[in-house]
Amino acid sequence: MDERDALATLAATLPAAGDDAAVIDGLAITTDMLHERADFPDGTTRETAGWRAVGASLSDLAAMGADATCAVAVYAAPEFDEKELAAFVRGASEVCELVDAEYVGGDLDQHTEFTTATTAVGRVEEPLRRDGAEPGDAICVTGELGRTAAALRRFAAGDAESGNDLFRFTPRVAAGRALRGHASAAMDSSDGLARSLHQMADASDCGFAIEWDRLPVHSAVDAVAESEADRRECAAHVGEDFELVFTTPDPDAALAAVEEAGTAATVIGEVTEEGVVADGKPLPDRGYTHG
Amino acid sequence: MDERDALATLAATLPAAGDDAAVIDGLAITTDMLHERADFPDGTTRETAGWRAVGASLSDLAAMGADATCAVAVYAAPEFDEKELAAFVRGASEVCELVDAEYVGGDLDQHTEFTTATTAVGRVEEPLRRDGAEPGDAICVTGELGRTAAALRRFAAGDAESGNDLFRFTPRVAAGRALRGHASAAMDSSDGLARSLHQMADASDCGFAIEWDRLPVHSAVDAVAESEADRRECAAHVGEDFELVFTTPDPDAALAAVEEAGTAATVIGEVTEEGVVADGKPLPDRGYTHG
């Protein structure tokens, strides 16, 4: 059983689970585990790791349109270095502050590889879901795509400073909240835009048609992309950008609401009857699979 | 820096953290990580592992006097075996049901060793704390002590069935809730009774005097203990029993409230001015240190 099948088994067993976060009794809750080897390239500071790990969980709350209340983390490492632990806590606290949540600590554990398990909790009465997209709706995305792809190239090139800067993103909690009542479907782009579109198309039983030229690509991608094909790979497939992908029957109102919340958003295509395509050609369901 | 120093650093950094669970905005939240090697002896089923891991987090909510709303877990293993995953989810769901909470799934991760990170969330307005014990208060404990020590001996003897039975405990959520307004201080006994008493004595700036004969020792301990000294080791030092240790100025009322909630509780001693003693002799601050 691979991870996607296993997740499907879990979701089938547990009716309250599903989408980006589980919602029960007015609470949204989500948990994730990240590892040094798979998720934090050489040069990632512990501050960035704390920020990014907690940010990923906060992004799941954003995708549900939830307010963010708090986050916790298990910090597991071969040894507890006081400076590294303090840096992790600082990063975790900073990203929480950005979205009006509080980082309230967690647990420590001894581990051969630096590993962190983060959980975020928020409040939402009527969560945004993945399954409400309708043909004719506009497809939109917040912020810019490819930020993480560019960061990975920077880390690989030994430019850890730029890599760390790009790795510290703003979870779209304010935008998600603004989308309540506007978005017909929403999720975050953690597995990449292409995979997000496929998942929303499956959940909503419809198709998604986007246009390459409309994608808001992060300027850092232009500095690293080797070709137009590579640029598209960075923007649509690498993933882990933690932007919101959403559909709406009234893009003018939705975009205005998101902008009021301090985030840019862009229309990138239209919901159709079937198929997931870019410029009319099938867009492969290929993206980042969490290690 | 060892784990206790590191935890102290975390607690000092984060004012909302501390005690068994962090409390913010009417929510109690707690997270833990457990490993196959350190926490699940050979013979532990995945159902028991799910039960116990989620139960440990629910026990932290109990120690705060919180209601339990839900729990999530990251399930990390070298491979995803459908039956093992389903068993884990079953155990996790069962222990949640026992305390009127809902298990809402979580995340999957690939890992060399079976590892789980669990988080439980509940609601509480005025949490029980560790720092309110006053000289003259009665010291009490719910249920029976030594259950986990006996289980470990059973597992070591190859009697996995008894080990699994003893490993699946009832988190004292109902008792914790009943203790609101009755307990002057409370925590769970996850690190062992002795260490819990020391931690409450430190937090409350007072002493704890217990009597060995008053400890409610689990009958399974009598079957495995080699001597009276060994029996005391099992009951007071091995830990991981997840009972509540609490103090109260009015033991009659507190015990009646706990019994009304379906749990037995026993007075085991009295809060004093200073020192932590059993039968008048210093009780060492020695217990289980989480691996």
Image (cartoon, coloured by chain):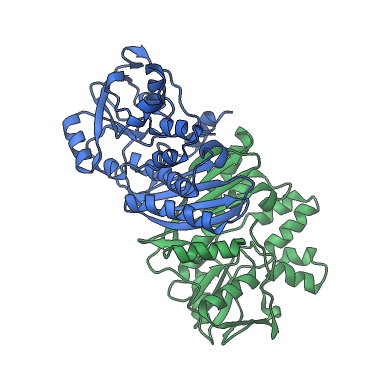
Chain colours: A green, B blue
Task: Name which quarter of the figure residue B144 lies in.
Answer: top left
Q: Residue furthest front?
A: B158
Task: Name which quarter of the figure residue B170 lies in.
Answer: top left
Q: Residue furthest top?
A: B281
| In the displayed structure image, the side of residue B25 where residue A134 appears, left or right | right
Question: What's the residue at 57%, 28% (across, down)?
Answer: B2
Q: How many marks?
A: 0
Which of B205 and A266 lies nearest the eye of the viewer? B205
Quadrant where the C terminus of chain A lies? bottom right
* A251 w.r.t. A101: above or below: below
Quadrant where the N terminus of chain A lies? bottom right
* B153 w.r.t. A191: above or below: above
| In the displayed structure image, the side of residue B240 where residue A194 appears, left or right | right
Question: What's the residue at 69%, 86% (across, down)?
Answer: A280
Counting from the top left corner in percent of width and height, residue A211 is at 67, 81
From where the camera sits, is residue B199 visible?
no
Counting from the top left corner in percent of width and height, residue B234 is at 41, 25
| In the displayed structure image, the side of residue A249 where residue B171 appears, left or right | left
* B71 w.r.t. A145: above or below: above
Question: What's the residue at 43%, 51% (across, down)?
Answer: B91
Counting from the top left corner in percent of width and height, residue A196 is at 60, 71
Counting from the top left corner in percent of width and height, residue A224 is at 79, 63
| In the displayed structure image, the side of residue A171 where residue B139 appears, left or right | left
From where the camera sits, is residue B266 visible?
yes
Which of A11 and A125 lies nearest the eye of the viewer? A11
Q: Residue furthest right?
A: A226
